[in-house]
Image: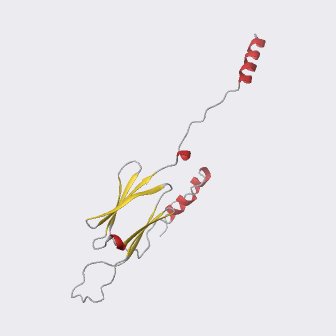
Amino acid sequence: MRTNLDFSPFYRSSIGFDRIFNLLENASPPQNADSWPPYDIAKLGEDTYRIVLAVAGFGEDELTITHEPNMLVIEGAKTENDGVQYLHHGLALRSFARRFELADHVTIVGAKLENGLLIIDLKKEIPEEMKPRRIAINIETDKKAASKRIESAAA
């Protein structure tokens, strides 16, 4: 399902935002999307975020966190116990892969596994050269002298 929004007016006055408009147009989740494991995304501050995944039953050695360009991939792979015969198997300890699209300049600060929750902290850090800066206006001394001459000639 695609959105019904028309982004063409934005293309006239913005440059370099094609990727964002494409993401917004294709933002609908896949029809058969797996919702496991459950997760939360929290905004902790102006530029800090946290992702919390419920990964009960998984150890640190069974989880993999990969930071690709503009993508965070979290994978869990549980080893099979072939010698165990279950009378009832209600725990969802299946393998998973969860992907999160990241904005430019979002970095992973850290990750920890606490009480069955995988906690990943993120921060948006804009490089110094990309921050707004004030541009000084240089006034040439020749123009000042020329303007003074014009004023005195008119008088």
Q: What residue is shown at x 46% (from left), y 56% (from top)?
A: 106
Q: What residue is shown at x 44% (from left), y 72% (from top)?
A: 30
Does 22 sit left or right of 114 as displayed?
Answer: right
Does 41 sit left or right of 90 as displayed?
Answer: right
Q: Position of residue 155 (x, y in %)?
A: 75, 10
Q: Tell me, what colour scheme is on the image?
A: secondary structure
Q: What residue is shown at x 34% (from left), y 78% (from top)?
A: 78
Above/below status of 89 relative to 122 = below
- The residue nearer to you, when weighing 119 against 36, is 119
Q: What residue is shown at x 39% (from left), y 52% (from top)?
A: 48
Does 71 sit left or right of 111 as displayed?
Answer: right
- Look at the image and tell me whether residue 97 can be seen: yes
Q: Position of residue 86 (x, y in %)?
A: 23, 87
Above/below status of 24 relative to 148 = below
- The residue nearer to you, when weighing 121 against 38, is 121
Q: Position of residue 53 (x, y in %)?
A: 33, 66
**Image-quadrant location for residue 112:** bottom left
Above/below status of 1 relative to 107 = below
Instruction: Please identify the residue farthest to the top as the structure is shown.
Output: 155
Q: Position of residue 90 (x, y in %)?
A: 24, 80
- Look at the image and tell me whether residue 35 can be seen: no
